[in-house]
Image: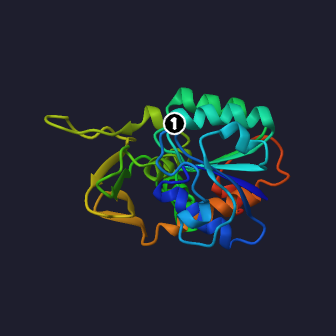
Amino acid sequence: MRLVVVGAAGRMGRMLIASAGETQGAVLTGAVVSPHSPFLGQDAGLLVGRPANGVRLSADAAAALAEADVIVDFSTPETTVALAALAAARGVAHVIGTTGLSEPDLAALAAAAERVAVLRSGNMSLGVNLLAVLVERAAKALGSAWDIEIVEMHHRMKVDAPSGTALLLGEAAARGRDVALGEHSARARDGLTGPRREGDIGFASLRGGTVVGEHSVIFAGSGERIELAHRAEDRGIFARGAIAAAIWTRGRPPGLYSMADVLGLVGA
């Protein structure tokens, strides 16, 4: 499977390059960076402390896609939307770990998915996606009488909130209740907010230090509470999951997919 990594010089990009080099069936053929990157022209293997692999970091995404089966993209919403159109035009599958996407952004990805396989997830780890299944089931079983609060913490450099993983878990809870998250979401509380609205799914975002990622989903009932949690200890889990997802897209028909599809958890 010929892979192109976007944002190759970043922290996640470097882990993706290293993981691709360790994964049977994956071949790195392109590494895309910003036109202003100081790493332009460097060998991708040497960049991550491995033997040279002959793939030079480039700002020419179109040229990289010409030799690719799938693009793995942990970038910015603006870049992801532009790449989605480019990948769809060239028949290249698109694996997306970008967070902070708006509704118009998601609509653009849906349009691209009419032409190629587009796999998007706010978190690529097995544990988180299993947690989402459990959250959906619990939300369905307990009903709206139980309050749901999602608490997440990440490192001080994270720029979006709530995290993509928190939103993934919120969507799972909303599906369990058969409601739209956008209509039952509480994301900011300050001052005299009044009593909690029944049926809301609340979010709280904490930032500090070097925390890789911690997420808790709290179901608070009358006189009792259930907490489901996941703690990421190694950022490499996201890179390994993304490369596995990229390989999974081989031969898939056009459509929108998630890590739940990769892991066989859809309908589980």
Can you give x and y, in whole percent of width and height, for residue 71 in the image?
68, 48
Amino acid bearing label 1: Pro
Towards the viewer: 258 or 191: 258
Question: In the figure, 158 relative to 138: above or below?
Answer: above
Towards the viewer: 140 or 77: 77
Q: Secondary structure at mark 1?
A: helix
Question: In the figure, 30 relative to 215: above or below?
Answer: above
Q: Badge 1 local density, few (<14 within 10 Å), some, or many (20+)?
A: some
Can you give x and y, in whole percent of width and height, for residue 47 in the image?
54, 63
- The quarter of the displayed image where residue 56 is located: bottom right
The quadrant in which the N terminus is found is bottom right
- The quarter of the displayed image where residue 228 is located: bottom left
Question: In the figure, 114 relative to 92: above or below?
Answer: above
Q: Residue extending furthest left?
A: 191
Identify the residue shown where x is 72% and y is 40%.
63
- The answer to whether residue 145 is left or right of residue 109 is left
Can you give x and y, in whole percent of width and height, for residue 33 in the image?
55, 45
- The quarter of the displayed image where residue 90 is located: top right
Identify the residue shown where x is 38% and y is 41%.
200
Can you give x and y, in whole percent of width and height, for residue 243 in the image?
66, 61
The quadrant in which the C terminus is found is bottom right
Pointer 1 residue: 77
Q: Is residue 207 visible?
A: yes
Q: Residue extending furthest top?
A: 104
